[in-house]
Image (tube, rainbow, N blue to C red):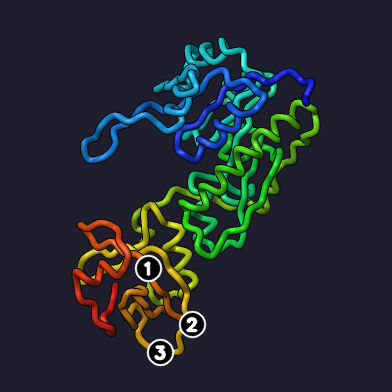
Amino acid sequence: MSTLKPLRVVFMGTPEFAIPSLQALLDSRHHVAAVVTQPDRPKGRGRKLTAPPVKELALQAGLPVLQPAAIRTAEFLEELRSYRADLFAVTAYGRILPGPLLNLPPFGTINVHGSLLPRYRGAAPVQWAILNGDAETGITIMRMDEGLDTGDILLPGVIPIAADDTAATLAVKLAGLGGRLLIEALDQLQRGELIPRPQDERAVSLAPPLSKEQGRIDWSAPAGSISCRIRGLDPWPTAYTFLDNKRLRLFGPKIVGSPETVEPGTVLRADREGLLIATGRDALLIKEVQLEGARRMEVEPFLQGRRLEPGTRLG
C-alpha cells in the first residue's frame, strides 16, 4: 500500500484509443481532477453532433469536462490552473500543446505515445508500424515538450505485431498497454524512480497522416508487402484495387506460397475460402471485400451476388 499522497491529474484525450488510459486513472489511487477533450463534431450521414468517446466516459464518471475551441489563450490556462493539478496526462488529444500549458503543473505533462520512440513520431504510429512490416512495436510514456513527439523517454513497453493484426486490432492492444504503463509511470515518477532519457536523433522516423491515395494496391509488389498495406490501412483509409472499373476494398489477407507464374493481379481462384490473387511474389488469399457502393462482407456472400472467374485481372 503506497503511503504517497495521490496525484491530482488533469487528463487530456479524445478518441477510443485514450479510453484505457482514462479508465486506468479512474481505477488507480490517483485523482482525476478534470478531463480536457476536443469539441463535439458532426458525424455520420445525418451529421449529428457527436461527443468524443473520452467525454462520454468522463461524464459517466462525474468528472468536469473542458472542450476548448482554442487552447492558446490566457483564459484557458487560468481555467486549467484552477484545478491545481500535480500533472497533466495526455493520450491522443489531437492538438499540439503550447509550452506554458505543458509546464503549468509541478510534475509537468506526460504523454502516452503509440510507438517505441524515436521511431514513428507523428499522427499515425500504429498504422506505419504495420505498413513497414515491423515485428514489434509498443508504447512510450514520454515527457512532453513543444516539439512533435520529441520529449524525453520515461517508460517504454514492447508488444509483438501478430501476422493478422490490423491497425484496429493493434491499436486496441496498444491502448490497453498504454493505460497500464501510464499508472506505472505516475507511481515511479512520484517516487523519483524515473530517469528521463533523451531520444536518439539518429534513430528518428516519422509517421505522417495517411491519405486515401496510399490505399491503391500495386500487385507487382510481393504478397507480404501488400498484406502489410491491407492490414495497416484497415479500418481507414483501406486498401483497394479495381474490379470492372469499380473500387474494391480488400481485407483479411493471408500469404499463400504460389508456384504459378501469372500476371500480378490475376484472380487464381474465387470460392468460399476467399479470393486467391497473384502478386509479384507468392499469392494473397483475401477473406473479405467491399465493392464500391456496397457493405463490407466475406467473399462467399460476395460471390453469390456476382460471378468472378479465375483469370480475371484486378487493378
The vertical placement of 291 against 17, above or below, is: below
Gap between marks 1 and 3 measured at Cα = 22 Å
Secondary-structure class at tag 2? loop
Where does residue 264 sit, x and y in percent of width and height?
Answer: 37, 80
The vertical placement of 130 against 10, above or below, is: below
Q: Quadrant of the C terminus?
A: bottom left
Residues packed near mark 1 inside 10 Å, few (<14), some (14 to 19) or many (20 plus): some
Residues packed near mark 2 inside 10 Å, few (<14), some (14 to 19) or many (20 plus): few
Where does residue 243 sit, x and y in percent of width and height?
Answer: 24, 71
Q: What residue type is labelled 2?
A: Gly
Q: Is residue 101 left or right of residue 312?
A: right
Residues packed near mark 3 inside 10 Å, few (<14), some (14 to 19) or many (20 plus): few
Q: Which amino acid does label 3 sit on?
A: Thr
**Residue drawn at 38 percent across, 80 percent down:** 278
- The residue indicated by pointer 2 is 257
Q: Give the image quarter of residue 7.
A: top right
Q: Which labelled disc corresponds to residue 67? A: none
Pick whichever, 34 or 296, lies toward us.
296
Secondary-structure class at tag 3? loop
- The residue indicated by pointer 3 is 261
Secondary-structure class at tag 1? strand
Q: Give the image quarter of residue 246.
A: bottom left
Q: What residue type is labelled 1?
A: Lys
Gap between marks 2 and 3 measured at Cα = 12 Å
- The residue indicated by pointer 1 is 287
Front tag of 2 and 1: 1
Gap between marks 2 and 1 measured at Cα = 16 Å
Where does residue 206 sit, x and y in percent of width and height?
Answer: 54, 50
| Badge 1 or badge 3: first in the primary sequence | 3
**Residue drawn at 58 percent across, 27 percent down:** 26
Front tag of 2 and 3: 2
**Residue drawn at 48 percent across, 64 percent down:** 228
